[in-house]
Amino acid sequence: MFDNLTERFQKVFKTLRGQAKLTEEHLNTALGAIREGLLDADVSLPVVEELLAHIREKSLGTEVTLQLLPDQQVVKIVRDELLELLGQPVRLQFASRPPSVWLLVGLQGSGKTTTTGKLAKWLAEHGHRPMVVSTDVYRPAAREQLSQVAQAIKQPCFPAAGLEKPLEIARAALREAKLSAHDVILVDTAGRLHIDDQLMDELSMLKKELSPAEILFVADAMTGQDAVRSAGEFHRRLGVTGVLLTKLDGDARGGAALSIRKVTGAPVKFVGVGEKYDALEPFYPDRIVSRILGMGDVLSLIEKVEKTVDQKKAQKLAEKLRKSEFTLEDFRDQIRQLRKMGPLEQVLGMLPKIGPLAKIPKDLEIDEKQFKHMEAIIDSMTAEERNDHTVIDGSRRKRIARGSGTSVQEVNQVLRQFQEMRRMIKQYGSMKGKMRGMGRLAGLS
């Protein structure tokens, strides 16, 4: 996400690097490039013009910190203005007495049903007892689809058997939630291919009947300014409390995410970053701005690691690394842990674009199948071979290749990658030892 915009900003900051002073000529060149980058990212024109005016004013005004170099000055000002544009994180709203009702609204095809499931899964993981219900009585099999999603995420779905009117379904679901002690009801509403009075009247009646704590507009981020315009219309007629952008991982531009709050007044609260049901993240403006400016999103990366990594295994591995006992079994465990973290392109996107990481191509495609093949190769080894790779001779390599459905060349490649990792780990341990020794000599430890 935001790949194109990040690349543009990096080029702008690079042109300012090494300048002794930030002149108006330098600033004009930088702002021209920033303007072009923002428009290419499909950011709303009025938003771009206002943003650039603020950057110009602060860059040439008294707010510039004299201790900073020109590129650092511009980075700081751009960061501050982007944060102002996106606003502060907004807390999720819950009713004073449960159950809280969250209405999910939006146009047909925006991903409301799948997003309802993702949101239910997220709520369940954060200590809530959600229930989902569909009031879409128009789209064929809409309610059956939500039921299947609910089964996949292991969360309850109100069946609404025999009910054919949205208001009747909503009332019955609310009663059921109270009786079964669910604290949040997620209502997947009907959509249309376009905004019309019939749709808005139905949603207005649901709002009046249910008094929702949240009205979340679900929009496809890849539709850019169309999503912004739709969000604005829904907000004008319904008063949405927040926006949930789907498919943000597939949007290299990101204009909708940057424009939507300024244009509509409704904050972005969640973003969808993949197809899996756990691919939903709260929207943190400061983290998004860091990604846009190429500074990475280390906090989100840490949270992802904490969520997916087995802490006991991690401690056990650390002890093995300390003793230089890293085996193929450990290598396989690390591959599995890495795969649990999701698409590796997303993980790399959270790393700062500095030093050697700046050389990672933005269009890098990582074949997830390769990791499956590596696992299959190690799985085809005996326990002895996984614990002592030196016993793997030519005949054993042929047997491993046959057992894993791969070639001897692929087996050799896995062994080379494993040995390279062992060497790097050993060097790292040696380097830490030398650093500690130098510290002791210098009286530092």
Image (cartoon, helix red, strand yellow):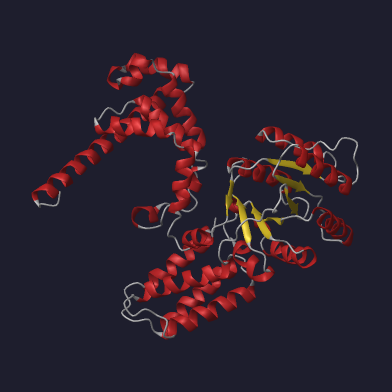
Question: Could you tell me which residue is drawn at 41 percent across and 56 percent down?
Answer: 352
**Residue at the spot 49% in from the left edge and 36% down from the top edge:** 339
* Left or right relative to 427: residue 374: right
Tell me what residue is drawn at x 41 percent, y 35 percent: 311
Residue 136 seen anywhere in this rendered image of the structure: no
Residue sitting at x 53%, y 78%: 52
Taking 445 as reference, is 265 left or right?
A: right
246 to 143, vertically: above or below: below
120 or 418, nearer to the observer: 120
Q: Locate residue 173: give its quadrant.
A: top right
Give the vertical position of 75 relative to 279 (above or below): below
The image shows residue 165, relative to residue 372, as above or below, that is below
Q: Nearer the viewer, residue 75 or 393?
A: 75
Indicate left or right for 437 with 299 as reference.
left
Residue located farthest toward the left when viewing the structure as drawn:
441
Whole-percent x, y for residue 312 in the image: 40, 31
x, y percentage for residue 117? 68, 42
Q: Whole-percent x and y of residue 335?
A: 43, 33
Against 251, residue 415 (above or below) is above
The answer to whether residue 250 is left or right of residue 349 is: right
